[in-house]
Amino acid sequence: MTVAETEYQHPLMKAYWAQIDTHFKPVEDVFEDVMAEALAILTREGINAYLEAARVIGKLGRGVEPMLAFLEEWPSAAKALGEDALPEIMAVIMRMQKSPNSKAITPFLQTLAPVARRLHSQERMRHYLDITLDFMERTTGSIHGHHTTFPSPGLPDFFAQAPFLLGQLSLVGLKNWVEYGIRNYRGHPERQKDYFTVQSADSRAVLQRERHGTLFMDVERKLDLYLRGLWQASEQLVPYSTAFDELRKPVPYYDKLGMRIPDVYDDANTIPGIDRYRATLAHMVGHRRWTTAQIADNWSPFQRMAVEFFEDCRIETLLCREYPGLKRIFLALHPKPVEDACDPETTSCLRHRMAMLSRALLDPEHGYRDADLLTFTERFHALMAQGESNTKDIATLALSYVAKTRRQSDQYAKVHFDDTVVDYRDDNRQMWLFIEESDDEEMFEKEKKRTPSEEEKGLPPRHYPEWDYHSQTYRPDWASVYEALHPKGNPAEIDRLLEKHSALAKRLKRILDLLKPQDKVRIRYQEEGSELDLDVAIRSLIDFKGGANPDPRINMSHRTDGRDIAVMLLLDLSESLNEKAAGSEQTILELSQEAVTLLAWAVEQLGDAFAIAGFHSNTRHDVRYLHIKGYGERWGDEAKARLAAMQAAYSTRMGAAMRHAAHYLEARPADKKLMLILTDGQPSDVDTNDEQLLIEDTRQAVKELDRKGIFTYCISLDPKADEYVSTIFGRQYTVIDNIQRLPEKLPELFLALTK
C-alpha cells in the first residue's frame, strides 16, 4: 500500500511524506516501513533532522539510490553513534557533492550503518570521516590545469570494503592501510582500484601486516604440531570469521568436521594470541578425552549451566595435571569477578556466582569468603583427589550446588554479565543429548517464533548481507526484507482444487499411510494430560515440602511420532508466474497454487511442522516476504485464504528471501530441516546488471544454510534452468519441464525427500 493510498488513514505519515518533498516511486513504496524503524529509534527532533537530511540528499541530482540508502541506513547508524553525528555526516556528503567524487555518495551511505556499528562512537566515526576526507582530497586529480579534474578512482571501492576492513583493522591500522594505497597508487587509477577492492597482492599483504592480533593463517602449522605432539590429536582446525559479529556471535566449538576456532586472537592479559589458541584447543581436547554426554531433557537451563562450569573446571584440572604450565595461561585468561559486584536484590547473580566458583576451583588463592563457595570448592577437590572422576559425578555435585545456592532473584530478567565470560572455553554443545522435546526456556523461546499478526504489518525491515563474488566479501546490510501476512482470499477455492485432484489425493494417501509414524512418544510437562508424570510429580512434591514453588505441569500425554521434520516451502512470486504454462490455458501461478495446495494437504496428513511463504523484490531496498502459513498455524481456512489470494509481481532476489526464511526455520526444534524453493527462473532484480551477481549470492546463501543444518532443495520450472541451477544448488534440485504435471510432481518429490 503506497503513501498516497494511506494518506487519509495516517495524516501524520502524510506530513512526513510532504516533508521529504520527493516524487521517487521506489521511496514511496518503502516510506512507511523505513519510518516505522525511524520512529522506534529517533527522537522527535531526530525525526525532523532525518527527514530534512533525506530531502537534501534527494535534491543532489544523484537519483534515487542515495536517498533510499540514507532512509534505510541512518536509523541504525544513529542508534550506534547518536543523533548528533548527523551534521558531520551531512558535511562530508556535501563536500563530496561539491567535488568530482559525487558518485561516491551512494556507496558511502550504503555502508553507513555497518560502519557505525563497528565504530560504536561519534569520536571514532569522526576519525573515520577524517580518513575519508584525506583520501578524497589526496586522490582527486587535475588534468593539464586547474579547471578539469577527475574523481578519486578508489574512493567508492574503499567505502564498499569499509565494514570488512574495520572488522579486521583498528582505526590506526585502517589509516596506515589507506596511506599506503594513496602513497603508491595515487597516479595509477586502475592499480588504485585493485588496491582498494583488496584484490592486489600488496593490498592483502599490507592488510595482514596492519591487522591486529595473531592470525590463524600465521600459526596454523604450529597449532597442528601442538595438537599432534602434546595431545596426540589430529583434528581438522576450521577457522571462522570474526569480521561480522553483528550477523553471528561466534564461539569456539567442535563437531565431526573438526575444531572451530577464531581466525584471529588478540593478546589478552599478557597472554599472546598463540597461547590463547593453545588454551582453547587444549580445553576442547580435554572435553573429547574425558567428557561423557549427558541427557539434558529433565534439567533446567540453570542446572545445565552449573554442570558446564563444574565440568569445564574438572577438564582444566586434569589438563593441568598433565601439563602444569597451562595453569598460568588459564588463570590469566579466566575472569576474576569481584565478590560483591552483583546485587541480588535487583539482579540475577547466578552467572556471577558460577564465574566466582569457577575461578575458585582453579585458583587456590582466589580470596573469596562465601561459605557455600568454599564448601563446594573443598568437595570438588576431594572428588578430584580420587582420580579423574567422571562427568556424571561432577554433574551430581553441580546439581547439589544449584539446590543449595539457588535464590528467587535467579529468575530476574536483568542478569549480571560483567567478568563472567570465559572466552577460551567452547560452547559445550557436545555435553548434551536431547531425547524429547524439552520444557526449558530456550525451547520455550523457540516455540514463540511465529508469523506476524495482522496488527504487526509494517514492521521495520530486517537487513541481510549480500555476497559480492568479485571481491569475495559480503556487502553488509545490503538487502532490506519487509515481511507481512499475505492478503486473504476465499478458502473455498482451495477446497475446490483438492476436489479437482481427488484421484491424485487418493493415490498419495496410500503412500502417506505407509509413511505415517507409528511410534508413540511422551509429551511431558503438561498441566492437563492423559496420565500422571510420576518423576515430575515427585519433584514438585519435594519442592513444595522444601518451601519452593512446585511445578504444576505434572501430567503427560502421548503422540505418535517417528518423524521430526520441519519444512519451509518458499515460493517465488515474481511477475513471470503470470505467464501461461506451455500447452495449457492456466498460468504458472495457478498451477503452482494447485501444487502447493496438494503439498500442504500431504504434509498436514503426515503431521510435519511446515510453513509456506512467498517472496518477490523491487530492487534490494524492497524485498517483500509474505507469510502464507506459519508453523504455529494449522492448515485451515486462514492459511487457505492466503494461498487462494496468491499474486505474482516484480523480480526474484532469492538469496535475501532464503536467509529470511532460514531465520524462522532455524528456530524450529527439529532433527531435520528442509527448505523447498519453488521458482520459475534464475535470481534477478531490476537494479542488478550483472546476472551472475545474484546467482552467486544465492549460491552463498545455500552454503550458509547448509552450515546451519538446513537442507535446501530447488524445484525449478524453467526449461533453461540447467544453465545455472546446478551452480547454485549443486545436485539438490529438480527441473520440471512439463509444468502441467507440477501438482502431481511436487508432493511426490517431497515424499521422496522425507521418507
Image: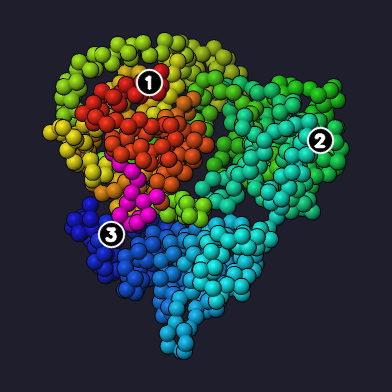
The region drawn magenta spans: 680-692
Q: Main secondary structure of the magenta part?
A: loop
- Near mark 1 (Cα within 10 A), the count class, few <14, some 14-19 or many ≥20, is few
- Side of 465 relative to 413 (left or right): left
Using the rendered image of the protein, determine whether residue 76 is visible from the camera's viewpoint: yes
Q: Earlier in the sequence, mark 2 or mark 1?
A: 2
Answer whether labels 2 and 1 touch (C-beta < 8 Å). no
Q: Check residue 229 in the rendering and tell me which mark sits there, or answer none.
A: 2
**Picture coordinates of residue 733, whole percent (x, y):** 38, 32
**Residue 5 position (above or below residue 498):** below
- Side of 35 relative to 293 (left or right): left
Question: Which amino acid type corresponds to the residue marked 3 in the rendered image?
Answer: Pro
Q: CA distance from mark 2 to mark 3?
A: 61 Å
Secondary structure of residue under mark 2 = helix
**Picture coordinates of residue 154, whole percent (x, y):** 50, 69
- Side of 343 relative to 82 (left or right): right
Q: Identify the coloring.
A: rainbow
> Which residue corresponds to the image point at 35% horizontal and 30% vertical from the top-left?
734
Q: Check residue 435 in the rendering and tell me which mark sits there, or answer none.
A: none
Q: Which residue is mark 1?
A: 752
User: Is 514 in the magenta?
Assistant: no
Q: Earlier in the sequence, mark 1 or mark 3?
A: 3
Answer whether labels 1 and 3 touch (C-beta < 8 Å). no
Secondary structure of residue under mark 1 = helix
Q: Earlier in the sequence, mark 2 or mark 3?
A: 3
